[in-house]
């Protein structure tokens, strides 16, 4: 069993870390305080190939594997969650779902501009009255000839204000016997007539990221922009969540690491009662827990990345990774503030931002409560992975790197 990273993976990791630390670190506090997205962030991530890191070169990507995607997300969130959120919705929810379910023509036409960063995508699933219950979606899509008329509203959508495309799941069959058979998924051009959108403000965390709402009123969606067959929307959405949760888990691992690094530095620097606070066992206990949680979280998401590379479906393992890493990141940030004492309560220091940013990941992409139900379902034998018509393709280095 080899836990070492390849030279290519190490190179990708360093490239993302350099971008985060050199280009974003000097300005992140200002944009967090202003509660504004960093204007050049997405363009720069596209130019560097970060947004398309795990897509085949023939589709505009960098030809790297799925573990490289996780490594990139860890580095992005080690700086700020807003960077990783952009990766989650553009690359994870939108791009990887297209890679899995799209036809060859759709990948050429729709995935290529997303993989290169020429276009920005997002995932639009949550609705004002619907969070975790995907089958209860009320957004509708009625087919009329070669187009669908899309009506409804999506809420809490990351990149809503800046995305060019949205992966949207809507109800296409109101009479379906099973709710899961009533849904279909589309890639919607957000510049189409009938689309309105806006930004949400006053968020607890991820303040340097774009979050908003999207409304559809008789929006015409071409038939060729439907992903998969009509009625496969529930399965496609669940697949998208698997990809998104993987990026959330790997990103949260980076936040644990950031809290640990900040705590260790402060524990060496801060003096109390005549010696560095790192010499006190209660401080050591907190730091030791962070170090342990980082190692566990990293191993969990590495396992998911490896399984994706092998063409295996890691729904359960992704759930383990997402729940553990997000909860551990919140606790790590909380303990970092405790180590900093009163200074941890100030936005002059990073732990305050880490704590605010960490809280949302316990809710979005499937709350901890949903992850608990998923895990219990597998353990009790009430849940199993049935074969899908389209599985995420295993990583093939030759195919991925061919033009």
Image (cartoon, helix red, strand yellow):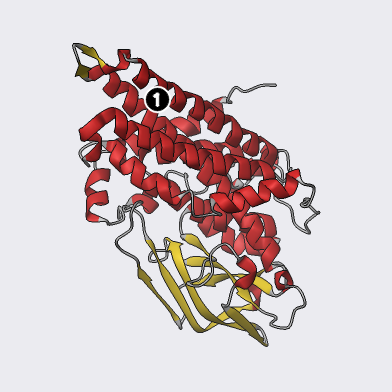
Which residue occupies the foreground of this view, 318 or 367?
A: 367
The residue where tag 1 is placed is 286
Q: Look at the picture and state if 391 lies above or below 355.
A: below
Image side of residue 266 versus residue 97, left or right: left
Q: Look at the picture and state if 107 lies above or below 272.
A: below
Residue 112 image offset from top left, x and y in percent = 56, 57
Residue at 45 percent across and 77 percent down: it is 215
Q: Look at the picture and state if 108 lies above or below 151.
A: above
Image side of residue 382 versus residue 368, left or right: right
Q: Look at the picture and state if 31 lies above or below 187.
A: above
- Whether residue 53 is visible to the viewer of this picture, yes or no, is no
Element type at mark 1 = helix
Residue 1 image offset from top left, x and y in percent = 70, 21
Count residues near mark 1 (Cα–Cα under 10 Å), then give few for <14, some for 14-19, many for 20+: some
Residue at 32 percent across and 28 percent down: it is 262
Choose top left, top right, bottom left or bottom right for residue 77.
top left
Residue at 44 percent across and 35 percent down: it is 254
- Whether residue 207 is visible to the viewer of this picture, yes or no, is yes
Residue 294 image offset from top left, x and y in percent = 49, 29
Which residue occupies the foreground of this view, 364 or 35?
A: 364
Q: How many marks?
A: 1
Image side of residue 365 versus residue 303, left or right: left
- Residue at the farthest bottom position: 144
Residue 96 image offset from top left, x and y in percent = 60, 53
């Amino acid at each position: 069993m080899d836990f070492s990273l390849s030279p290519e993976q190490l190179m990708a990791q360093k490239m993302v870390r350099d971008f985060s630390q050199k280009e974003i670190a000097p300005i992140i506090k200002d944009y967090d305080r202003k509660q504004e997205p960093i204007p050049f962030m997405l363009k720069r991530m596209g130019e560097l190939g970060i947004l398309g890191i795990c897509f085949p070169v023939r589709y505009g990507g960098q030809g790297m594997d799925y573990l490289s995607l996780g490594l990139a997300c860890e580095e992005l969130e080690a700086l700020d969650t807003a960077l990783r959120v952009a990766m989650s919705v553009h690359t994870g929810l939108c791009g990887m779902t297209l890679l899995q379910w799209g036809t060859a023509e759709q990948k050429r036409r729709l995935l290529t501009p997303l993989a290169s960063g020429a276009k920005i995508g997002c995932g639009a699933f949550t609705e004002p009255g619907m969070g975790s219950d995907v089958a209860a979606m009320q957004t509708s899509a009625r087919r009329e000839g070669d187009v669908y008329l899309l009506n409804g509203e999506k809420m809490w959508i990351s990149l809503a204000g800046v995305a060019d495309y949205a992966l949207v799941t809507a109800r296409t069959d109101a009479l379906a016997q099973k709710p899961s058979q009533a849904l279909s998924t589309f890639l919607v051009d957000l510049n189409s007539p009938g689309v309105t959108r806006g930004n949400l403000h006053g968020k607890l965390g991820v303040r340097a990221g774009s979050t908003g709402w999207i409304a559809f009123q008789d929006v015409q969606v071409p038939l060729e922009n439907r992903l998969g067959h009509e009625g496969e929307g529930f399965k496609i959405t669940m697949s998208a969540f698997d990809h998104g949760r993987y990026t959330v888990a790997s990103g949260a691992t980076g936040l644990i690491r950031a809290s640990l690094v900040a705590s260790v530095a402060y524990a060496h620097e801060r003096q109390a009662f005549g010696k560095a606070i790192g010499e006190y066992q209660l401080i050591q206990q907190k730091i030791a827990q962070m170090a342990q949680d980082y190692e566990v979280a990293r191993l969990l998401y590495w396992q998911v990345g490896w399984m994706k590379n092998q063409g295996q479906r890691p729904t359960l393992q992704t759930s383990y990774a997402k729940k553990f890493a997000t909860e551990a990141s919140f606790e790590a940030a909380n303990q970092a503030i405790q180590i900093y004492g009163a200074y941890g309560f100030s936005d002059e220091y990073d732990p305050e931002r880490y704590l605010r940013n960490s809280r949302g990941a316990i809710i979005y992409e499937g709350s901890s409560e949903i992850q608990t139900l998923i895990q219990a379902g597998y353990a009790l034998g009430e849940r199993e992975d049935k074969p899908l018509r389209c599985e995420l393709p295993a990583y093939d280095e030759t195919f991925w790197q061919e033009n």
